[in-house]
Image (cartoon, helix red, strand yellow):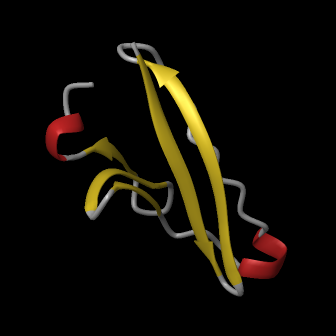
Amino acid sequence: MSVSLQSVLYVPGGLQQRDLSGLVGETVQLPCHVDTASCGTVHSVKWYRGSSRIYVFSEMAVVDHAEGDYVDR
């Protein structure tokens, strides 16, 4: 079964949006290109599905985990 996703990256001055799809149970790469020359250092990246946060990554805070229903995926 295929699942459709939408990637939205909020950055200063606008946002980047991209439609994605993947197979249930398979690995999907969520793109997140940040121009650190324009935006500065990245503290954290958070992915949401609707209004629910599903994943957090922060190299600075050493955080890399899924949340909610996505914990065991």
Residue found at x 15% / y 45%: 68
Q: Work out whether 11 lies above or below 53.
A: below
Residue found at x 67% / y 85%: 12
Could one spot residue 54 in this view of the protein?
yes
Rendered image quadrant of residue 46 = bottom left
Residue found at x 58% / y 37%: 20
Rendered image quadrant of residue 14 = bottom right
| Relative image position of residue 44 (x, y in whole percent) | 48, 64
Q: How many marks?
A: 0
Residue farthest along the left direction in this orientation: 68
Q: Is residue 15 left or right of residue 22?
A: right
Q: Is residue 59 left or right of residue 69?
A: right
| Quadrant that contains the N terminus | top left
| Relative image position of residue 45 (x, y in whole percent) | 49, 60
Q: Nearest the camera: 40 or 30?
A: 30
Q: Work out whether 25 lies above or below 37.
A: above
Q: Nearest the camera: 12 or 2?
A: 2
Residue farthest along the bottom direction in this orientation: 13
| Relative image position of residue 9 (x, y in whole percent) | 59, 64
| Quadrant that contains the C terminus | top left
Q: Nearest the camera: 9 or 1?
A: 1
Could one spot residue 28 in this view of the protein?
no
Rendered image quadrant of residue 29 = top right
Q: Work out whether 33 lies above or below 67.
A: below
